[in-house]
Amino acid sequence: MTNSLRRRSLLGAALATGFAAPALAQTYPSRPVRLVVPYPPGGATDITARLLAQELSQSLGQSFAVENRGGGASVTGTQAVATAPADGHTLGVFDSAFVVNPGLLGSRLPYDTRRDFSFVSVLVRSPLVLVVPASAAWQDIAALVRDAKARPNELTFGSAGNGTAVHMAGEQFRLAAGFTFLHVPYRGGGPMITDLIAGRVQMAFGTIPAMAEHVRAGRLRALAITGDTRAALLPEVPSMAEAGFPAVDAALINALVGPVGLPAPVLARLAEASQQAVTSQAMRSRLTELGFAPVGSTPAEASSQLLAQIGQWERVIREGDIKVD
């Protein structure tokens, strides 16, 4: 092909793309869309996905249906999205495991989290709360840190499981404060909370709605909220930044993600519709009950935030020498 013909061919392709983009944005979605949740039904991510599906079905004129693909520490469902056609009709609603697993599992993942996905939008975010038994002597975080430093590896830290978001929050806190503890992983948050109330473990992070009722009932004492903002459900509890640990900013997230190569018009339409969904009165009200705050980021913002979190958790996992079987 001559240079002249090549230039005309490229110009024609560019013009075709330019005309096709608005058309694609208007025609998407052209059939039902599945939202993969990499967990069984009933959890916070599943609830967020179902709320989102309802809103998107109404606003985009096609059915958005949640498909629960649990197993493999969320890897099974996540892989289903990574290998789906890049047409926007298979998407995933993922939580913090999506950004933790690259550091935790590394080359064992059957996909590359940085390269095999299109980041549509960070939907919601929820800080965590550090709690201790009500019977504990520590009245604030400074007292806890002093005691932990004086008793290396003696204090016990409970979590809902090795590699979970609440475990990562504990490791981030430990590294920032400069002490060591004995990690006690449980199979879920319920048994951990039971032992925490009984004093069989001495500290833990948890979701604010799950812990707030125990704090109000006098069974647990809340010491700090991750990040730099206090929580509406526990307004009397200082943030980690106020307590002197601004680096402790672990939070639960839910993000809308698709396979790599989603067309830009589809990305933009999904992000705009998702932002409208999470800020709608109905969805905002239910999310507040779950302890989530709506975010609704753009694809560029989602990419920046999620890639930064992947790097952040890789550092925490490496510096904390955290391993899973």
Image (cartoon, rainbow, N blue to C red):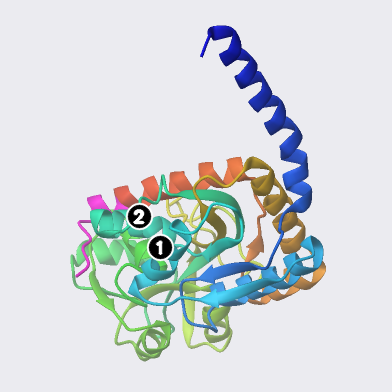
Considering every residue shown, the one lying at the far front of the view is: 1
Q: Return the x and y of residue 55 as percentages of the image width and height.
A: 75, 68
Residue 70 falls within the magenta-colored stretch: no
Which is nearer the N-term, disc 2 or disc 1? 1
Q: Is mark 1 on a helix, strand or loop?
A: helix
CA neighbours of label 2 inside 10 A, class few (<14), some (14 to 19), many (20+): some
Report the residue marked by disc 1.
79
Circles 2, 1 touching at the beta carbon (< 8 Å): yes
Q: Is residue 155 above or below residue 304?
A: below
Q: Give the position of the C terminus as an image quadrant.
A: bottom left
- 49 to the left or right of 106: right
Q: Callout 2, which amino acid? A: Tyr
| Residue located at (35% from left, 71% from top) | 73
Q: Callout 1, which amino acid? A: Gln
Please indicate, yes or no, whether residue 50 appears anywhere in the rendered image: yes
Q: Is residue 111 above or below residue 209?
A: above
Q: Give the range drawn in magenta.
A: 316-325
Q: In the image, which disc is placed on residue 111?
A: 2
| Residue located at (45% from left, 51% from top) | 244
- 106 to the left or right of 219: left
Q: Return the x and y of residue 254 as percentages of the image width and height.
A: 55, 63
Q: In the image, which disc is placed on residue 30?
A: none
| Residue located at (28% from left, 77% from top) | 185
Q: Nearer the viewer, residue 218 or 277?
A: 277
Please indicate, yes or no, whether residue 125 appears anywhere in the rendered image: no
Q: Return the x and y of residue 192 as percentages of the image width and height.
A: 37, 84
What's the distance in space between the residues labelled 2 and 1, CA to CA?
7 Å
Q: Return the x and y of residue 212 as percentages of the image width and height.
A: 57, 79
Q: Nearer the viewer, residue 40 or 162?
A: 40
